[in-house]
Image (tube, helix red, strand yellow):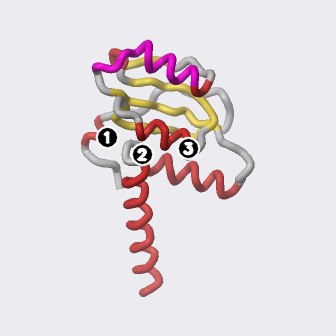
Amino acid sequence: MSGLNELKRVFEGLHTLYEMHLPKVHPKLIHDLMMRKRNNPDKDPFYLIEIFTKPEVSSEQMRDYIISKTGMNPTIHDSGTHYAFNNKLTLEFLKELSDRKDVIAVYGDYMGAVTGVGASHDHREHEHGWIK
């Protein structure tokens, strides 16, 4: 049983690190990205990335920021507080997004290629804590 207890302890520690260093990024996205990079370290995988911002953020400024960082034009939802786009993803980009004062939450789903299905997350998941 001690091996299982150690596994649980390390898992909790990992989630604590996620919360410390990438507090606005959903843990499932961080874990998925890290697993894909572990299996294929030389390739940055494509994700549908969804960013939720504070209501007072200018949707034009956020749109321009996303285009400048990724070259992708995001779709904008929920009165300019929800942005979705497909792009290659790195931990560094997640850190940059998480550090932005105007960002509330970041989600993502692996797409495998440039094509995607569109926005699918609701920021209210973040308000109630991440699903564990």
Assess whether mark 1 and mark 2 are in contact (beta carbons under 8 angstroms).
yes
**How far separated are the C-alphas under marks 2 and 3?**
15 Å
Residue 8 percent across, percent down from the top left: 41, 73
User: Given the image, on which type of amino acid does mark 3 rest?
Assistant: Glu
Taking depth in this image into account, of 78 and 54 the one nearest to the observer is 54
Tell me which secondary structure the magenta stretch mostly adopts.
Answer: helix
The magenta stretch spans residue 61: yes
Taking depth in this image into account, of 106 and 114 the one nearest to the observer is 106
Q: Which residues are magenta?
A: 56-68
**How far separated are the C-alphas under marks 3 and 1?**
23 Å
Most distant residue in the right direction: 42
Which element carries disc 3, helix, strand or loop?
A: helix
User: Quarter of the image containing the N terminus?
Assistant: bottom left
Residue 55 percent across, percent down from the top left: 29, 21
Residue bearing mark 3: 92
| Residue appearing at x 59%, y 43% in the figure | 90
How many labels sit on residues?
Answer: 3
The magenta stretch spans residue 57: yes
Query: Which badge, 2 or 3, comes first in the chain's sequence?
Result: 2
Mark 3 closeness class: few <14, some 14–19, many ≥20 residues within 10 Å: few
Residue bearing mark 1: 125
Q: Is residue 67 above or below residue 33?
A: above
Horizontal relation, residue 49 to residue 128: left or right:
right
**How far separated are the C-alphas under marks 2 and 1?**
9 Å
Disc marking residue 23: none
Q: Is residue 75 above or below residue 69?
A: above
Which is closer to the viewer, label 3 or label 1?
Answer: 3
Most distant residue in the bottom direction: 2
| Residue appearing at x 66%, y 38% in the figure | 112
User: Given the image, on which type of amino acid does mark 1 rest?
Assistant: Glu
Residue bearing mark 2: 26
Residue 78 percent across, percent down from the top left: 34, 19
